[in-house]
Image: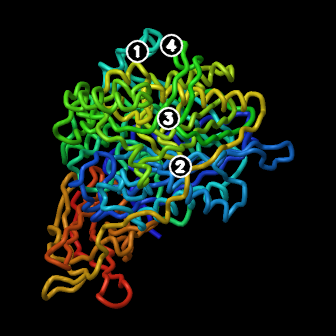
Amino acid sequence: MAGLPLSPASAAGRTPTRTPTRTPADARGAGSYLVGRGIADATGEVAEVGLMGYGRTDQQAEGLHTRLRARAFVVAERTPNGAAGERVALVVVDSPMIFSSVHQAVLRALAERYGDLYTARNTMITATHTHAGPGGHSHHLLYNLTTLGFHAKTFDAVVRGIVEAVGRAHADLAPSDLTLSRGELRDASVNRSRAAFDRNPADITAHFPDAIDPLTTLLRVERHGRLVGAVNWFATHCTSMSGDNRLVSADNKGYAAYHWEREVSGADYLADTAPEVICAFAQTNAGDMSPNLDLRPPTTPEDFERTRRLGLRQYEAAARQLERPGTPLTGGVDSRLVYVDLSDVTVEPEFTGDGRTHRTAKPAVGAAMAAGSLEDGPAFPGFTEGENPLWDAISHSVIYTVSPELRDAHAPKAIAVPIGEMNRILPWVQEIVPVQLVRIGRLYLIGVPGEVTIAAGLRLRRTVAGITGSDLDDVLVAGYANSYFHYVTTPEEYDAQHYEGGSTLFGRWQLPALQQTAARLARAMRDGRDLPAGTPPPDLSGRALALQPPIVLDAPQLGRSFGDVLTQPRESCRAGERVTAVFAGAHPGNDLHRGSTYLRVERTEGGAWRTVADDGDWSTTFRWQRDGIAASKVTVTWDVPADVEPGIYRIRYHGDAKPLVGAVRSFTGTTRAFTVLG
């Protein structure tokens, strides 16, 4: 497969800040746990599919900047005889959300392979929440509105990528040591809903004096003192890429992982062997944390540099922790999970904060949700965060008068869409959701299927820490886990009805309901008791609607053949310049090239061509556009790295064309050779 003739830094054109691939050996070299690491390609369709996150129907994918990957870590207790005891699987996916559809399909596939080793209880699947990933992989209608329904190819790519990553982690199990460390990162997030945050009581605002959660937590995996894996948790949205962007991208957290694995540690994602170091950058309570420090939505193409810069800061904050001894983890591995019908929870006074019992209710979309987050990307015109006079009047004079149950649960929300009532006809949003608690030694992860504000996250963490007797910083919210139900705010933040409050679907008492559930999980784990999981959500795979027209025919431009070079690169270039080539192409949806690449930048070496960059590299882009009815143009760019090795180069494009009748046919286009000058 592809080699790496350049230095790791050269692959992307920058010198790494440090190369933290080795840490001091310690006496625990025999390995306190059995740990396995795995990584796999989870990129879906990159053309004519809506990108998920900004809710824009015009944001249809037109190509690829960086591939999306699933990274998995299996952690098992090591019994006295060296065998694997209780285990958990942690998965971090470069994906907008983890929908119930994906969760169910992954668990079915893992059960077919491994029996009851990996179940809903001990498998935590989380998303980085990139807003530049393809959608269409949910079975709930709301999330497929901007994608023209369900996209089976994208769904299959996400599921297969996760299953492969877990499988590779399972096969990689080996004695390992785990170390937990913490740091602070204060220039990679800003509170985009400060007025709502400031409504919280002093015990919360004093804990976060800058209205951000600066905690960056690193779980590192070492074998005989050598770093082989890491998981970092830090709260910031993956909205560095703009809503005007049309290229699939892993956004800032994806860049952080890519930088560590490839630019620093020299990983070759196309090789048959696993990277030496696998590093995941996971979300925590990022609900109101924006990476756009100027509180303005990014623009394209400036968003590429913003994404790289925010990712690099997250990497550097994690890598700095390797210089500290950290806390070696010891103790058990455990997990609990329950399914909760959030539309019908009685919340006890212990958690409501006002000494009274309250209930959640059917989900409802607030007018503020329709406004979108103005700091990251506004949604529909005519709606605002905060007051919406028309919808306020309708809600308070009509909806809440007719339904006191909705009023008690949802007021003061201005209800724009009573989506719970719509659920009675078709499945628009999920009501039965998984809530999970995972323990690895002293580290506790609360798996919440949504976007938790830092204040709501603090209350969840305090709930679990108080029951388990843990240090607060050893308890983290693992957001975007196992499913998706939008936002979680404190009741005080909810009352402001900013975007986050309007998106808290189950009303003012949703967070207390989740605290109550987390308390049940924590008590059961502390006491060594099992909990009945409850009734899981229904399998809706037979009800998915697909409205995207299929690919009917690919045909080259008149007088051309597939793979012909329509625009050749310049004969020579230098570091820092952009090389561009245009090919007579075909629709990239014919073959997603999962685990492979649509393009290669190659250099001649010893009479042979060797790959120096592919479509997963930061330095390349792959753009597709329709040219007439059936023809396609494919534009490949390569930003020549600053420390590039001079020589003779070429660009190759790998495409797949669909005839009117018969099987898809692969082809390759190759540019003329060009010189990169020193």
- Tag 4 and tag 1, C-beta contact below 8 Å: no
Q: Residue at x 50, y 41 (%)?
A: 449
Q: Secondary structure at mark 4?
A: loop
Nearer to us: label 3 or label 4? 4
Nearer to us: label 4 or label 2? 4
Q: Is residue 613 visible?
A: no
Nearer to us: label 3 or label 2? 3
Q: Is residue 433 left or right of residue 112?
A: left
**Toward the viewer: 629 or 405?**
405
Q: Secondary structure at mark 2?
A: strand
Could you tell me the amino acid type at mark 4? Answer: Asp
Nearer to us: label 4 or label 1? 4
Q: Residue at x 62, y 31 (%)?
A: 444
Q: Which residue is mark 3?
A: 233
> Whole-Å distance between the Cαs marked 4 and 1?
14 Å
> Whole-Å distance between the Cαs marked 4 and 2?
46 Å
Q: Secondary structure at mark 3?
A: strand
Q: Which residue is mark 4?
A: 354
Q: Which residue is mark 1?
A: 200
Q: Tell me which numbered mark, 3 or 4, is placed earlier along the sequence.
A: 3
Q: Residue at x 36, y 16 (%)?
A: 210
The extreme right residue here reads 81
> Whole-Å distance between the Cαs marked 3 and 2?
15 Å
Could you say which disc has been placed on residue 278 in the image?
2
- Vertical arrangement, residue 653 with respect to residue 275, above or below: below
